Amino acid sequence: MTAVLARPTVPRPRTSAEDAPRHTPAVAYQRVLHQALRREFRLLSDLAGWAPADDAGRAADLTGHADLLARVLLQHHTTERELLWPALFRVLPAREDDTARDAVAYWTSRAALLDHMLRDLSTVARQWAVAHTPPARDAFARACARVADTVDAHLTAEERDLLPLVARFLTDTEWTAVGRAATTTLCGRDQLLLLGLVLEDACAIDRARVMIGLSPATRTAWRVVGRRNYRAAVVRLRGAPPAA
């Protein structure tokens, strides 16, 4: 019997859904980043399941993308833990404090579990990149699927319990201060690749919000080289160009 390749669903730009929470720049950024992470971990699981186990180049592409996503999410958790939640607590009214502390405690336990899973994913990724065997490939695909499920549950809880508080109480000035204090270990090329992932299936309003928050130099870099490099990276990874 001939196997038929079921291609992963290629994302399409979203329409705006201006519902709660109120879409401040902070909420817009969190939402589009969360959507990109959900999508990419799920796609990785699908793509790995169909990849030839002994194709060293394909293994390198997929495990390299997993490494990028893991670094982005670990860094995102660090920024939230060390900067965003403390900034939120500084402006919360007393009546919201207990609820927020319970939500952050729950977030912290979920984030710690997910961070551990991301490090496990890095381990199985290295094993496939070296061994190039079907069992190693399958272990990587399963790990991606487990991470995708956990990411979805974790981010859903954050969006339900914490982002409404961010929308109501964190001012744009305070969010800007969080962004300025945050650090990144991503090189310039990886930062532009992440920007492409974030913009790909965001609605037009959220795309505009993200772009406005960038420096003029970053916007220029995206127009000159970033968009082209992102398209090439997506074609290499998925076998199809990005949605937009």
Image: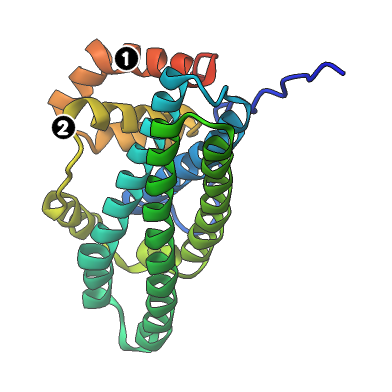
Q: Please tell me in which quadrant of the rendered image residue 97 appears.
A: bottom left
In front: 199, or 72?
72
Quadrant the N terminus occupies: top right
Residue 121 rendering spot, x and y as whole percentages: 43, 49
Determine whether 51 is above or below 145 in the image: above
Which residue corresponds to mark 2? 215
Determine whether 158 is above or below 228 in the image: below
Residue 4 rendering spot, x and y as whole percentages: 78, 19
Residue 213 rendering spot, x and y as whole percentages: 24, 38
Determine whether 198 is above or below 226 in the image: below
Residue plotted at (50% across, 62% down):
154
Q: Please tell me in which quadrant of the rendered image residue 216 appears.
A: top left
Tell me if I can see residue 16 in this picture. no
* Image position of 199 (left or right of 218): right
Q: Who comes first in sequence, dot 1 or dot 2?
A: 2
Residue plotted at (43% across, 21% down):
56
Residue plotted at (16% across, 52% down):
182
Colouring rule applied to residues:
rainbow
Q: Amino acid at mark 1?
A: Asn
Q: Tell me the distance, in whole angstroms, between the alpha carbons under discs 1 and 2.
A: 19 Å
Label ID, residue 147 = none
In front: 114, or 20?
114
Which residue corresponds to mark 1? 229
Observer-side mark, 1 or 2, equals 1
Question: Within 10 Å of the Cα at label 2, are there few (<14), some (14-19), or many (20+) other Cα atoms?
Answer: few
Question: Within 10 Å of the Cα at label 1, are there few (<14), some (14-19), or many (20+) other Cα atoms?
Answer: some
